Amino acid sequence: MRFYPRLIQDFQSYSQERLAKDVGAGITVGVVALPLAMAFAIASGLSPQVGLWTAIIGGFLISALGGSSVQVGGPAGAFIVVVYAIVQQHGIAGLLVCTASSGVLIFLLGWFGLGGFVRLVPESIVIGFTNGIAVLIALSQVKDLFNNTYAVGLGLMTVVLIVCWSRYIAPRRPILARLPAPMLALVALTVLAWQMHLSLETIGSRFGEISAALPQFSNPFAAGAFDFSWQGLQKLVMPIATLTLLGAFESLLCARIADEVGAGVYPPHDPNQELMAQGVTNTVLGFVGGMPATGTIARTLTNIKCGATSPVAGLVHAVIIAAFVLLASKLAALVPLSVLAGLLMLVAWNMGEWHEFVRFKQRSYFDQTVLWVTFALTVAVNLLVALAVSLGLVLLQKVLNKAN
């Protein structure tokens, strides 16, 4: 399989006009990604700095090496539950081993041309899987959102402000449309809490100040970094498999949605190149203390909406986040965790395709069963079991249909 990033192809017809559009889109996406990167890391049991550097390094590499003109990568909500479980059971060292190992496997999936197979996953599994993850994200934020009365109030204000700004204010005032609602809510409510001296847990009170220091190279496979006994390795098989399948699945699902939204404007993505880029990215992140990264739907759709023309927009988005970390990261210590919890609650709601449960009543009994089994197992057991059982049901049906 040839390794040929879309960035090279897009540069063949690049112009100053396209550069201006890409820079504008990249700045907006960078501002959107900033609070999400911190929120996803904190919800995963990691420091906000891990999320920020994952957005910087992961976002840059995915855009530079990927197979899509507009896909933007970084830490994703879909990984929250998986990463949290790995950190709790195996520690940070275990997470880095899993991240780097899954990166190698994802790269091999693309190298051997298996990217197209992800497109064959039935819609019932995709919807059940996505909605189940959305529920888990929402449940993970209950503690921070209901920490105290002030936390509840600030979390609800976050949701209301973002919804009102996005649906009612920005559409009627085009000049305000480029001001991302999540960043507006983050800044406005942080200032409000600081001015009123509200008794709230903040990023600083839990994690301390975010350091502007560059991430350090560390070998998670080095002796003493992790228990590499046979028993220790056996415990990592399922987490690595989960990150591999989830990373490949989420990335190509996002790229497919981008193709549908940008049909006729952007060339279709190359699924195998996209997987190879995700593989390289996650392997690197495993050696610099990052968390898993993949293509992200919200940031990619924002990128398209803002008029991006090439992966340069994704590169700019990474530079914008890096500028914040290096120049203004100390300000992040003031952000109340309840504001991030409110933001993630909204992310969970928007991530879920709840209307599909109603629409699927018109589908076959088997499709409905697969949807609900996938959803229930995702919430009650884990993502890999949900995917394995639901795919097993689909394969069993195909075998029985052929037998008949």
Image (tube, rainbow, N blue to C red):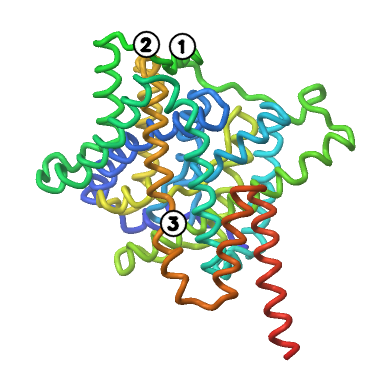
Q: Residue at x 61, y 34 (%)?
A: 84
What residue sits right under mark 2 in the picture? 199
Where's the C terminus, which quadrant? bottom right
Q: Residue at x 25, y 52 (%)?
A: 307
Along the polypeptide, which appears first: circle 3 or circle 2? 3
Horizontal side, residue 153 vs residue 212: left or right: left
Vertical placement of residue 314 versus 363, above or below: above
What is the x, y in percent for residue 250? 53, 53
* Tag 3: amino acid: Ser
Q: Nearer the viewer, mark 3 or mark 1?
A: 1
Seen as rendered, the residue at the extreme bottom is 404
What residue sits right under mark 3 in the picture? 68
Tell me the element at label 1. helix
Mark 3 touches mark 2? (CB < 8 Å): no
Q: CA distance from mark 2 to mark 1?
A: 11 Å
* Tag 1: amino acid: Ser
Horizontal side, residue 111 vs residue 56: left or right: right
Horizontal side, residue 246 vs residue 239: left or right: left
Q: CA distance from mark 3 to mark 2?
A: 45 Å
* Tag 2: amino acid: Ser
Visible in this render: residue 386?
A: yes
Between 272 and 387, the one nearer to me in the picture: 387
Tell me the element at label 2. loop
Along the polypeptide, which appears first: circle 3 or circle 1? 3
Say which mark, if any, is on residue 205. Answer: 1
Between 21 and 10, the one nearer to me in the picture: 21
What is the x, y in percent for residue 33? 38, 36
Vertical placement of residue 136 versus 88, above or below: below
Q: Residue at x 46, y 16 (%)?
A: 210
Visible in this render: residue 327?
A: no
Q: CA distance from mark 3 to mark 1?
A: 40 Å
What is the x, y in percent for residue 109? 66, 58
